[in-house]
Image (cartoon, rainbow, N blue to C red):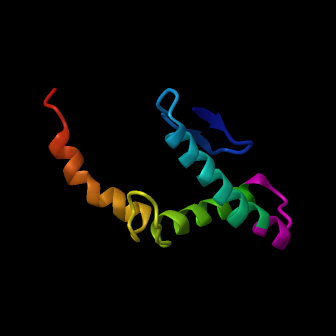
Amino acid sequence: MSYTLPWKTSITLALRLKSLQTNGICQRFQKTMLNEFYRVTFRKKLYKTIEELQADLDQWLKQYNEERTHQGRWCYGKTPMQTFIDSVPLAKEKMLAA
């Protein structure tokens, strides 16, 4: 799945074919972004440029990934960034020699 937002952000996701779980995770994130960022932000601020909106979105994504704890399947109360950092040694261990 790959799509480009109307501004400079491009998101590419590798989804397994016919994987409802992965698709559900993507849809849940999009719903969270809609409810917690866009709906709130557009009530509070009138944007004059896409760059202003992008800056606020980048700030929200940083908070979402690095400061806000998650209760998701793999996070167990950690931030997504901490979950990723914690998994690096395991990923390196599992890598096959090329």
Depth check: give the residue in front, 62 or 30.
30
- Residue 54 location (% of width, % of height): 68, 56
Compared to residue 6, the image places residue 30 above or below, namely below
Q: Quadrant of residue 56?
A: bottom right
* Residue at x-position 48% and y-position 34%: 14
- Which quadrant is home to the N terminus? top right
Q: Is residue 46 in the magenta section?
A: yes
Q: What residue range appears in magenta?
A: 40-50
Q: Is residue 43 left or right of residue 23?
A: right
* Residue at x-position 26% and y-position 52%: 88
Compared to residue 9, the image places residue 55 above or below, namely below
Compared to residue 52, the image places residue 19 above or below, namely above
- Residue 57 location (% of width, % of height): 65, 60
Depth check: give the residue in front, 18 or 40.
18
Compared to residue 46, the image places residue 11 above or below, namely above
* Residue at x-position 50% and y-position 72%: 68
- Which quadrant is home to the C terminus? top left
- Residue 92 location (% of width, % of height): 19, 45
* Residue at x-position 83% and y-position 70%: 45
- Residue 76 location (% of width, % of height): 38, 67
Q: Is residue 98 left or right of residue 27?
A: left
Q: Is residue 53 in the magenta section?
A: no
Q: Is residue 80 left or right of residue 64?
A: left
Number of on-image labels:
0
